[in-house]
Image (tube, rainbow, N blue to C red):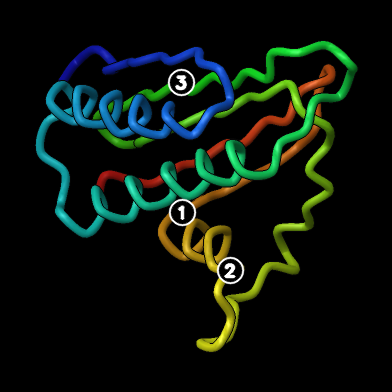
Amino acid sequence: MAEPSRRYLDAEVALENLEAVHELLEDWWGAVGDVPPRVRFGFDTAVIEIAGNIIEHSVRLDDETGRRFSLALTGTERMLHARFEDNGRPAGIDLSAVAMAGSEDENGRGLALAIASLDRLDYRFENGRNVWELESGRG
């Protein structure tokens, strides 16, 4: 793979668009080429967890309707990268404080799973948008 493999999605923040994220990933993997199964599974898990958090928790910053998110996927010979942006309020997340929820808890595992599945997960609020950056080496 000499040229990076790229895919992009811009969608309304809605539960049914989690399926669009799955479909985008499936199409992208076909172009990325061979990746060890544990790397692929981890990256898929992290992308779906972050998408799910955006869909479940994002609230618009302004009073307008139309919450939206975008997902850009890039695969190179060395790296897998995903970038989410959404137009919600700042998430107010400190990733260094994220811990796995206990076995009795029903929620609270998504970010911990994403962190454990990736080489890098970053979050920032920039230019009125939440930005999530996910990276994994190809293994």
3 or 1: tag closer to the N-terminus: 3
70 sits left or right of 36 in the view: right
Residue at the spot x=69%, y=13% of the render?
66
80 sits left or right of 130 in the view: left
Residue 41's x, y, as percent?
25, 53
Q: Mark 2: which secondary structure?
A: loop
The CA distance from mark 2 to mark 3 is: 27 Å
Residue ID for mark 3:
72
Say which quarter of the image contains residue 108: bottom right
User: Viewer-nearest of labels 3 and 1?
Assistant: 3
Say which quarter of the image contains residue 117: bottom left
Q: Mark 1: which secondary structure?
A: loop
The residue carrying pointer 1 sits among few (fewer than 14), some (14 to 19) or many (20 or more) residues within 10 Å by Cα, namely some
User: Viewer-nearest of labels 2 and 3?
Assistant: 2
The CA distance from mark 3 to mark 1 is: 18 Å
The residue carrying pointer 2 sits among few (fewer than 14), some (14 to 19) or many (20 or more) residues within 10 Å by Cα, namely few
Q: Mark 3: which secondary structure?
A: strand
Q: What amino acid type should be assigned to the residue bearing mark 1?
A: Asp
Residue 134's x, y, as percent?
50, 41
Say which quarter of the image contains residue 21: top left
Q: Are discs 2 and 1 less than 8 Å apart at CB?
A: no
Q: Are discs 2 and 3 less than 8 Å apart at CB?
A: no
Residue at the spot x=76%, y=13% of the render?
65
2 or 3: tag closer to the N-terminus: 3
2 or 1: tag closer to the N-terminus: 2
Q: What amino acid type should be assigned to the residue bearing mark 2?
A: Asn
The CA distance from mark 2 to mark 1 is: 23 Å
Taking depth in this image into account, of 45 and 76 the one nearest to the observer is 45
Residue ID for mark 2:
107
Residue ID for mark 1:
119
